[in-house]
Image (tube, rainbow, N blue to C red):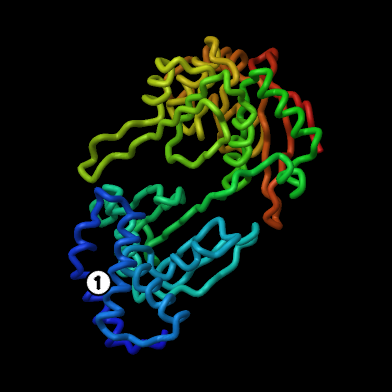
């Protein structure tokens, strides 16, 4: 940046003291606050009489706005096309996933406290905090990105920040076929399964494409069906004509106000749903999901972290047992409630693909899986 450091400091002070910035607080949201800060930066630059070429002036306004209302140097990484994940391992180490590959990139925070303050700037307007009393946070940013952060002493080498970005342009089946994520035969099978109101579980490891596939499956639901979509953090943007969305609430700064997924599933049952869809099943809500699917709410969908179709059944069974359902009842519910398990994998080169489609059948000792499609 061509402006001298003392000038930059004066600009920062001017913007910090601008009444419009103070007024654009939590009630107006992070996006509105960023717009106000950019306007205040532009005014401060004019008042300081800073003379820079147009390109450098634009970059200066953006840099100061990022520093005062955003994540500082991380904002530049989030603007890069093709970046889906930003992984910050302390104040001076960062990696991005770009086009399926992890790449180390430069990062310029002075220390861990500066990094913590940057995170606090963006989560503060959301009613969240990150400090020694609560050294971790989960947040959904205004652009839909998901942020997770952990502080020392839980992270002894410095704050850990993970940001997952989501594609703004919806995926199409043709896109996945073109990228080799699945073949046309598998796409046709899955689309028909949605039309036939089969209960579908997408399973796979982190970053395998479960959410992407779930969104595409929902796009096949017709306008005559009311879909209630329940997520821990709103990520899905399905092209679904009649969609009702609900999002779980984490505890507030006082540790109160939490609304878990299980409560939302129960509320969904009273909302005249044709299909109940849960973004990810990871706890006691599995009981209500299975009971809903087994009692006439056909065509439900969800995702679960598991490496194979058999592992997905084991994981769902384990969650139900931990939630207090008797073993025999769990196995009966799984057999009745589930139809198809779609297994997604992530290859070493970063490519994601559908590895298997299996059906759930009644076996001698409970539910079993049988492959109906493999590449």
Mark 1 closeness class: few <14, some 14–19, many ≥20 residues within 10 Å: many
Q: Name the spot of residue 250 as percent of width and height, x first.
A: 33, 39
In the rendered image, the vertical position of residue 297 relative to residue 306, given as above or below: above
The image quarter in which residue 349 lies? bottom right
When the figure is inspected, residue 345 is found, relative to residue 154, above or below; the finding is above
Task: State which quadrant residue 130 falls in.
Answer: bottom left
Find disc 1 in the rendering and name its residue.
Answer: 15
Q: Is residue 8 left or right of residue 184?
A: left
269 with respect to 201 (left or right): left
* Residue 208 x, y percent position in the rendering: 63, 45
Residue drawn 67% across the image and 32% down it = 342
Left or right, 55 with respect to 369, comes to left
Q: Secondary structure at mark 1?
A: helix
Image quarter where the C terminus lies is top right
Instruction: Compare residues 85 and 283 and report the one nearer the observer.
Output: 85
Rendering coords of residue 151 (x, y %):
34, 59
* Number of numbered discs visible in the structure rendering: 1
- The structure residue drawn at horizontal position 40% and vertical position 51%, both measured from the top left corner, is 141
Q: In the figure, 263 relative to 207: above or below?
A: above
Residue 100, percent across and down? 65, 57
Q: Residue 152: in sight, yes or no?
A: no
Q: Residue at x 32, y 55 (%)?
A: 32
Q: Nearer the viewer, residue 190 or 253?
A: 190
**Residue 219 visible, this orientation:** yes
Q: Could you tell me which quadrant the N terminus lies in? A: bottom left
Task: Residue at 60%, 35% (x, y): give it.
Answer: 214
């Amino acid at each position: 940046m061509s402006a001298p450091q003392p000038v930059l400091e004066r600009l920062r002070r001017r913007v910090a003291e601008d009444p419009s910035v103070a007024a654009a607080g939590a009630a107006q949201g992070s996006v509105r606050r960023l717009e106000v800060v950019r306007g205040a930066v532009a005014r401060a630059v004019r008042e300081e009489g800073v003379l820079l070429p147009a390109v450098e002036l634009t970059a200066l306004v953006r840099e100061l706005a990022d520093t005062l209302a955003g994540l500082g140097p991380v904002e530049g990484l989030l603007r890069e096309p093709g970046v889906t994940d930003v992984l910050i391992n302390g104040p001076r180490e960062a990696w991005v996933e770009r086009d399926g590959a992890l790449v180390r990139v430069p990062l310029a925070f002075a220390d861990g406290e500066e990094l913590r303050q940057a995170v606090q700037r963006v989560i503060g307007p959301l009613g969240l905090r990150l400090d020694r009393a609560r050294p971790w946070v989960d947040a959904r940013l205004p652009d839909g990105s998901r942020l997770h952060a952990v502080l020392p002493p839980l992270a002894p080498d410095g704050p850990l920040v993970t940001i997952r970005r989501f594609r703004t342009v919806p995926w199409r089946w043709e896109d996945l076929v073109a990228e080799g994520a699945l073949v046309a035969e598998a796409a046709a099978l899955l689309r028909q399964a949605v039309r036939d109101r089969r209960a579908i579980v997408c399973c796979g490891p982190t970053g395998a494409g479960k959410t992407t596939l779930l969104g595409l499956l929902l796009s096949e639901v017709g306008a005559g069906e009311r879909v209630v979509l329940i997520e821990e953090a709103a990520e899905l943007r399905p092209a679904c004509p009649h969609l009702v969305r609900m999002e779980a609430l984490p505890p507030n700064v006082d540790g109160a106000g939490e609304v878990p997924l299980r409560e939302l599933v129960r509320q969904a049952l009273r909302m005249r749903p044709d299909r109940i869809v849960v973004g990810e099943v990871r706890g006691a809500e599995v009981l209500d999901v299975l009971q809903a699917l087994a009692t006439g709410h056909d065509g439900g969908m969800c995702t679960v972290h598991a490496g194979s179709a058999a592992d997905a059944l084991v994981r769902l069974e384990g969650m139900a047992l931990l939630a207090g359902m008797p073993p025999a009842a769990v196995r009966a519910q799984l057999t009745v409630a589930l139809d198809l398990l779609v297994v997604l994998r992530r290859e070493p080169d970063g490519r994601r693909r559908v590895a298997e489609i299996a059906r759930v059948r009644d076996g001698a000792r409970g539910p079993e899986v049988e492959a109906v499609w493999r590449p």
